[in-house]
Amino acid sequence: MPRRRCAAQILRSVPLRDRAVLLRFGLDLDDPAAAALFVEGVRVADELIAEELRREAELS
């Protein structure tokens, strides 16, 4: 299983342009609560992608 990325690493990886888009949708990554929600969503997505890759590897 891939290593779980820390919150700071996830937040640093969001380009300014994407941050601006998120802000237009009301998600301010400078707000701790919003950042925590975003990070949790990214972690869930990471886990689902890893699970899908494992399933594909098993079928090969």
Image (cartoon, rainbow, N blue to C red):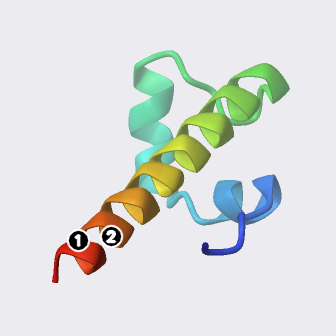
Residue 60 image offset from top left, x and y in percent: 16, 83
In the current view of this chain or complex, which residue is farthest to the bottom?
60
Image quadrant containing the N terminus: bottom right
Name the amino acid type tagged 2: Leu
Q: Residue under circle 2?
A: 53
Say which of 58 and 34 sits in front. 58
Say which of 3 and 1 sits in front. 1
Q: Secondary structure at mark 1?
A: helix
In the current view of this chain or complex, which residue is farthest to the left?
60
Work out how far the residue at label 1 is from the one at label 2, CA to CA, in angstroms: 5 Å
Q: Indicate whether 11 appears above or below 9.
A: above
Residue at (54% x, 42% y) in the render:
44
Q: Residue under circle 1?
A: 56
Q: Indicate whether 32 appears above or below 25.
A: below
Residue 35 image offset from top left, x and y in percent: 71, 34
Say which of 1 and 25 sits in front. 1
Q: Is residue 15 left or right of residue 4?
A: left
Residue at (75% x, 35% y) in the render:
30
Q: Which mark is residue 30?
A: none
Q: Secondary structure at mark 2?
A: helix
Residue 9's quadrant in the figure?
bottom right
Residue 46 image offset from top left, x and y in percent: 50, 56
